[in-house]
Image (cartoon, rainbow, N blue to C red):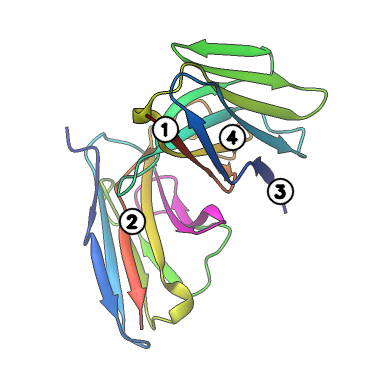
Amino acid sequence: NAGVTQTPKFRVLKTGQSMTLLCAQDMNHEYMYWYRQDPGMGLRLIHYSVGEGTTAKGEVPDGYNVSRLKKQNFLLGLESAAPSQTSVYFCASSYGGYSNQPQHFGDGTRLSIL
Amino acid sequence: QQQVKQSPQSLIVQKGGISIINCAYENTAFDYFPWYQQFPGKGPALLIAIRPDVSEKKEGRFTISFNKSAKQFSLHIMDSQPGDSATYFCAAVTSGTYKYIFGTGTRLKVLA
């Protein structure tokens, strides 16, 4: 069982470069999420999607864009990377939007912006 | 801004001891409180969760205690083991919002 798979696992970028982080889930989940994890700040929601073709802003959306063209994939884009975007990025998915349907996380993408 | 305050930031416990991590919230609309466990290099994984209509939930060595009037909940790890060494996050969510509000995490180290 793959669950939630994130690629790449590590990446170093220069300021101003762009890149896309890919998240794929094989659990047929409707809901998908992108978080960033920073020391002492826990997990903060960047963007989320409640179904194929839908996206919505989370707590810290500035500087990021997302797309959900296929149900199983959720892409996070950085158009012009900034050092403040150095972080560990986690993708998660859940079956539905009810609070008792747990979110399943990938193992993260560690991104450094120089 | 909705917040969940988690303490302590780090915790060191001897093998066999009890680990206690506390969380407090403000928004009374929260109605589901999960705890996630994260090992280094891995994503968080659901450990145990509770709803506010019960005061305690136990799964093996892990227990959540919930105090609705104080708006606090805590994770107790009994007979702590070195394999429990991880970062623990509490969270809170309101039904229908599917937006988890996470605490800042507690790094637990259990000494052998």
All told, the count of numbered labels is 4
Q: Which residue is mark 2?
A: A68
Q: Is residue A57 left or right of residue B46?
A: right
Q: Nearer the viewer, mark 2 or mark 1?
A: 1
Give the residue type at disc 3.
Gln
Q: Quadrant of the C terminus of chain A?
A: bottom left
Q: Position of residue B16 (x, y in %)?
A: 46, 18
Mark 3 and mark 4 residues within 8 Å of each other at the beta carbon: no
Q: Which residue is mark 3?
A: B2
Pinpoint the chain carrying mark 1. Answer: B
What stretch of residues is rendered in magenta?
A: A32-55
Give the residue type at disc 4.
Gly
Q: Which residue is mark 4?
A: B96
Mark 1 to mark 4 CA distance (whole Å): 41 Å
Relative height, residue A42 to residue A87 (above, below):
above
Which label belongs to residue B111? 1
Whether marks 3 and 2 lie on the same chain: no
Pinpoint the chain carrying mark 2. Answer: A
Q: Quadrant of the N terminus of chain A?
A: top left
Q: Position of residue A15 (x, y in %)?
A: 37, 87
- Residue A49 showing in the rendered view: yes
Q: Earlier in the sequence, mark 3 or mark 4?
A: 3
